[in-house]
Image: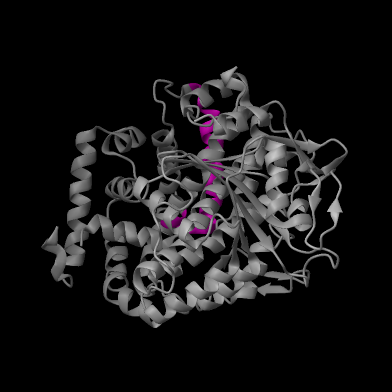
Amino acid sequence: MDDLTMLRDLGRDLDLEYEPSAGLARQRRRLIDETAGGRRRRPAWFTGGRRAGWIAVAAVAAVTAALVVVPTVLLRESTGLHLLAPPIGDRLPKQGQALTVLLLGSDRRPSWGDPESGERSDLMILLRLSADRKRATAVSLPRDSMVRIPQCRSADGRTVAAHTDMINQAYAIGGLTCARKTVESATGVRVDHAVAIRYDGLAKLVDALGGVEVTLPRAVDDPKSKLKLPAGRSVVDGETAVAYARLRYVGDGSDIARIKRNVALMQAMLKKVSRIDTPAAMATLVRVAATSVTTDPALDLDALVTLAVDVRRAGTRFTALTVPWRPYEKDPNRIEWKQPDATRLFARLTGD
Amino acid sequence: MVSSMIPLATPRLDSDLIAESRARPEAFAALFDRYASMLYRYVSRRLGPEVAEDLVGETFLVAFRRRDRYDLTRPDARPWLFGIVSKLVSRHHRDEAARYRALTRSPLDDVAESPAERVEDGVRATAVRPLLAAALARLPKGDRDVLLLIAWADLSYEEVAQALGIPVGTVRSRLNRARRKVREALGHTNPLRDEE
């Protein structure tokens, strides 16, 4: 093997699975202070607006992971073990048409959530694939964005009237259908498909992978999520891994830091998945993966596989953005989308 | 109108951001968002994560203070940033050498590997890692900068030349020398070295 290739491999081996978002966020604040002439100009909650770039970074990886991790598992399965039907060419999504997919990372963890809450979406990404599949643009919609949630039907058949709330409530109210309706009305973008990946499914996947490695810059003891980990590298099981990913009250405590840990977890999983080559281990993984993904009826596993094949073949380039936002007027702990920038962004998103 | 919009298909050039930051300093933060992770990864490979975080922060402070001197005809700021990084890294040459020496002693074993993984990786990567690390530790600083900017920062020859302020011919000769030494270090135990 080529010496440069070996060096590159060594470099990758030296990479941490955990990217120190808190640490770099500190360095970013150092720079911001410097650009402001050495003074701190804004209250802490507002600096979040300046960190939007981090979500973009995270979204690239999250989308890559969402498009790669799960379909990779399915894809390998469909070519190797024939437990699933092979992909059928003319199924949705149709080739040659641009495609908009709403990706949700959701949780169904009553032990952590509020007692009254059902399934909530923690991560929302609007993904646009160009007709030739060469370009993918991911727009991350922060979960605490205040938007108008249109009238939705809840799982138990009640009709919930339109109201303004955090965007992630839509999924809690009426699942994928309501989330999709809400995103469509808030963005003006027609959503072709919606996909939800559940955290509990993630935990099972991690267990099926035999655990994954996470690296923490310092020890964590968080009673809220019952997470206790030493500094440095640890191999963790599914539940711990998910607790780690969702941890909010460490680091800089931001949603961004949490998103980054999600990504780190995805990457750790991807690393494991890519190394599996025994049919038995893969079969287990596929069965687990199939239970942790929810899609709308049109986007079934076959379609996901087709999509994954298209994306791989096209060598798709990802652009990741966060919807332009600012603190919500009535509650600085929430955000609202900045207009007209947000509307323009969505108009350009579909204008291919 | 375009300048107020969020970049989508055509992101703004680094040079545009830097030009803007001369009048509007806070615009410089966008450069951080673009490249901090990339620089962090590079530095943490060479010096470890603890040093890397601070060093990346310092890189951007230095870059910010020198933004008036940036050559705006260069759209891509990576060579400039990696140039600053390289200077700052050189202050830590003892840490770097110590890091590579540590790697020669303890290969980066995953704590819990699946058996399949162990078989697949065991032959290849873990066997050469200590040799690679030892070779890196022994390289002269200038040669190591060139080699790692190519291998780990993915810069082109021209970009390395810009970053280090040396002629492209010097980049080539340093790279050849460094790669020869690495191959020699691997050569004793690696019968596949002529495969290339």
Examine the rendering and report whether any part of residue A85 can be seen: yes
Is B94 magenta? The answer is no
Q: Is residue A133 left or right of residue A329?
A: left
Question: Number of callouts in the render?
Answer: 0
Q: What residue do we see at 47% from left, 56% from top?
A: A303
Q: Is residue A77 left or right of residue A210?
A: left
Q: Could you say where residue A197 lies in the image, as x and y percent from the top left?
A: 60, 61
Q: Could you say where residue B5 lies in the image, as x and y percent from the top left?
A: 60, 25
Q: What residue do we see at 28% from left, 73% from top?
A: B127
Above or below residue B68? Residue A113 is: below
The one of A187 and B60 positioned closer to us in this rendering: A187
Is B59 magenta? The answer is yes
Q: Specify the segment rendered in magenta.
A: B44-68
Examine the rendering and report whether any part of residue B138 can be seen: no
* Name of the residue lying farthest toward the left: B194
The one of B73 and B115 positioned closer to us in this rendering: B115
* Name of the residue lying farthest toward the top: B1
Q: Quadrant of the N terminus of chain A?
A: bottom left
Secondary structure character of the magenta stretch overall = helix
